[in-house]
Image (tube, grey):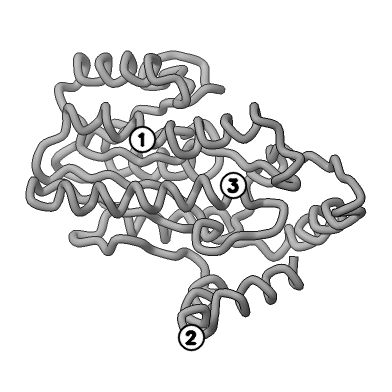
Amino acid sequence: MKKLNKEKIVVITGASSGIGEELKMLYEKVGHIVINLSRSCKEDNNNFKVDVSKKEQVENAFVKIFYLYGKIDILINCAGYGVFGAIELTSEEKSRQIFDVNYFGTLWCCQEALKYMQKGARIINISSACALYSLPFRSMYCASKSAVNMLSYGLRMELKNYGIDVTCICPGDIKTNFSKNRDITLKTNDKYGQRIEKSVNKINQREHLRMDKEKAVKKIYKICNKKHTKSMYIVSVKYKILYFFTRFVSQNTVLKMTNKFF
């Protein structure tokens, strides 16, 4: 990759693993300064130990970043995790936690970063193809990512006249540790029987069909650096086709097909 003449200050949440880590390496390779906000990192230099679901921790981190570098050019919200289980049987704690991380974590970071952004800056929210369709026993995750999409669209409209670009990227299934780190609850009752466990097993059997991480992240990185972005991108041929198809059939048909498949 060609080195850039002007370095940018890039903040990536969840850059200790997965998509965030790969993006961090790509941005560093071309000469940008990348700050990682992650709950699991060891704090040193540009690695800030931050739980994005904690607003005060997020505020303190962005104050430090501004003190060190005087600006923020790019914010990429990657931090997130999945919850698997029946909606009825998902605890209040888990229900709130997934929104605290996936949605509110994204919101807190956007709010704080915007204090230090100028015209030409950019926010990229890494959402999910699951934001576009509700899936049985993964609806809590789908709902949290759908909220991220709506947040991104609103920010895009509100910031347009100021010259700050906002987009959300919806990747499909990628070979990372995301599936391995999901919070899976197999608790069931007479309504669901073995359906929850069967659904988990079916998804696990498709692990080998997931997109190669490096290839997928290169596509995401290319989108992040477009001169002009669209409001939303889908990174997956399969989900692009499915999204196109759903525009011509009823929601009821989509739900029937999804339920049968998963």
Front position in the image: 129 or 73 = 129
User: Residue 214, how many percent across, how many down?
Assistant: 52, 54
- Please name the amino acid that badge 2 sits on: Phe
- Report crowding for label 3: few under 14, some 14 to 19, many 20 or more residues within 10 A (C-alpha): many
- Report crowding for label 2: few under 14, some 14 to 19, many 20 or more residues within 10 A (C-alpha): few
Q: Residue at x 59, y 60 (%)?
A: 134
Which residue does the numbered mark 1 point to in the structure image?
107
Labels 2, 1: front one:
2
Q: Earlier in the sequence, mark 2 or mark 3?
A: 3
Asked which secondary structure carries label 2, the reply is loop
- Please name the amino acid that badge 1 sits on: Leu
Do the residues under discs 1 and 3 have CB atoms within 8 angstroms? no
Q: Earlier in the sequence, mark 2 or mark 1?
A: 1
In the rendered image of this protein, does residue 57 appear above or below residue 246? above
Q: Residue at x 51, y 32 (%)?
A: 101
Which residue does the numbered mark 3 point to in the structure image?
141
User: Residue 51, how many percent across, how many down?
Assistant: 48, 21
Which residue does the numbered mark 2 point to in the structure image?
248
Q: Is residue 162 left or right of residue 54?
A: left
User: Residue 162, how many percent across, how many down?
Assistant: 8, 46
Q: Is residue 259 left or right of residue 188?
A: left
Q: Residue at x 54, y 71 (%)?
A: 239
- Please name the amino acid that badge 3 sits on: Tyr
In the rendered image of this protein, does residue 24 appear above or below residue 112? below
In the rendered image of this protein, does residue 175 appear above or below residue 41? below
Q: CA distance from mark 2 to mark 1?
A: 33 Å
Q: CA distance from mark 2 to mark 3?
A: 25 Å
Asked which secondary structure carries label 3, the reply is helix
